[in-house]
Image (tube, rainbow, N blue to C red):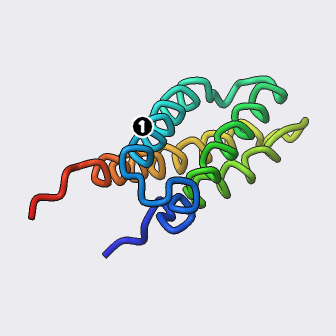
């Protein structure tokens, strides 16, 4: 079994057994992932890059998607005049897309009705 992408215990603190609210929050989070992924480009200026990473970090940590949040925290530091910056950003984007795919899939599984 793979490790969870969403910390349900963390999310439960905010939804208190309200499955509808949980599903709404996860749907909004999935929309945020898609929107922010489309903004990320290795060639972005530093301020835009850092802001996009920071926004996704906050959204991820809000729902308990710790892996994405931690990765985005690292991405916030890929700025400056480093000649390897673009290569580091490309590697980050590969990792982020993989984590995002797994996280989105988990969000969709969580929203599927459980048949008894």
Residue farthest to the left? Answer: 116
Residue farthest to the right? Answer: 81
The x and y percentages for residue 7 are 51, 64
Per the image, label 1 sits on a secondary structure element best described as helix
46 relative to 88 in the view: left or right: right
The residue pinned by badge 1 equals 27
2 relative to 99 in the view: left or right: left
Question: For residue 89, what is the image quadrant?
Answer: top right
- From this view, report whether residue 53 is shown above or below residue 43: below
Which residue is found at the position 47% from the left and 46% from the top? 100
Residue farthest to the bottom? Answer: 1
Which residue is found at the position 84% from the left and 27% from the top? 47
The x and y percentages for residue 36 are 58, 30
- From this view, report whether residue 31 is shown above or below residue 105: above
42 relative to 38 in the view: left or right: right
Which residue is found at the position 47% from the left and 64% from the top? 8
Q: Residues within 10 Å of mark 1 (few under 14, many from 20)?
A: some
The one nearer the camera, 43 or 73, is: 73
């Amino acid at each position: 079994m793979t490790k969870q992408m969403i910390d349900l215990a963390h999310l439960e603190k905010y939804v208190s057994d309200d499955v509808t609210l949980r599903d709404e929050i996860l749907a909004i989070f999935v929309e945020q992932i898609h929107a922010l992924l489309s903004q990320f480009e290795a060639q972005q200026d530093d301020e835009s890059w850092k802001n996009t990473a920071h926004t996704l970090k906050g959204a991820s940590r809000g729902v308990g998607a710790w892996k994405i949040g931690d990765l985005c925290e690292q991405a916030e530091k890929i700025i400056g005049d480093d000649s390897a910056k673009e290569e580091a950003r490309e590697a980050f984007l590969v990792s982020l897309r993989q984590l995002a795919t797994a996280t989105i899939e988990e969000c969709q599984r969580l929203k599927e009705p459980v048949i008894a």
